[in-house]
Image (cartoon, rainbow, N blue to C red):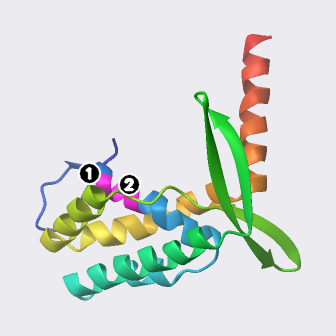
Amino acid sequence: MTIIKIGDSMPETTKMPSEVEKIAKFLGFFAACRAYRPIDMLSRPFSYDDVVNTINDALRQYSVAYSTPDYIEKRKVNEREVEIRYVRLRIGGIEKLVRLPAPPSSETVKKFLELCKEDLTYARIAASLAMTYGFRYSKEEAEEESEEKEEVKIEEEG
């Protein structure tokens, strides 16, 4: 858990609530898709209503992408077959697949909104973190990262 200073009304150091990180990871999908509106809106909320409306909008956009994926990959995970959904993007003439993350639970959203009601800084932190998580949803980049980790592991063992 990250320790970070949050708002002027908060103590000097506070543990980052896991809900902020979960929402940031979810919003990372929008960064990967270069659909920055939800992130931009959370980075400068003027009111609690702005946060609620932005989260609603992001969940609605996610729902559309989830129900109409461009590509579905089936994998076995812990003896279970799962579907991994992707949307296809064309960026600078290069086609790219972006994985849809698991949506945040209703409890996560509820707790995140409660936190933002106390201090809008939580929304700004989630927006900033989302930008760092965006690259993880690209199919190609995730595979490259996985290969790099495997190479490091092999080097450490050898």
Vertically, is 11 above or below 110?
above
The residue positioned 61% from the left and 28% from the top of the image is 79
Residue situated in front as seen by the camera: 142 or 11: 142
Q: Is disc 1 surrounded by few (<14), some (14 to 19) or many (20+) residues within 10 Å?
A: some
Residue situated in front as seen by the camera: 79 or 105: 79
**Quarter of the image where the C terminus is located:** top right
**Quarter of the image where the N terminus is located:** top left
Image coordinates for residue 74, horizontal then vertical, percent: 71, 46
The residue positioned 73% from the left and 69% from the top of the image is 70
Residue situated in front as seen by the camera: 69 or 25: 69
What residue range appears in magenta? 19-23
Which amino acid is tagged 1? Pro
In three-dimensional space, the C-alpha distance between marks 2 and 1, rounded to whole angstroms, equals 7 Å
Are the residues flagged by discs 2 and 1 in contact, CB closer than 8 Å?
Answer: yes
Image coordinates for residue 30, horizontal then vertical, percent: 56, 72
Choose top left, top right, bottom left or bottom right for residue 32: bottom right
Q: Name the residue under label 2.
A: 21
Whether residue 7 is visible to the viewer of this picture, yes or no, is: no
Which residue is the extreme one toward the right? 93
Vertically, is 45 above or below 139?
below
The residue positioned 45% from the left and 60% from the top of the image is 103
Q: Judge left or right: residue 30 versus residue 68.
A: left
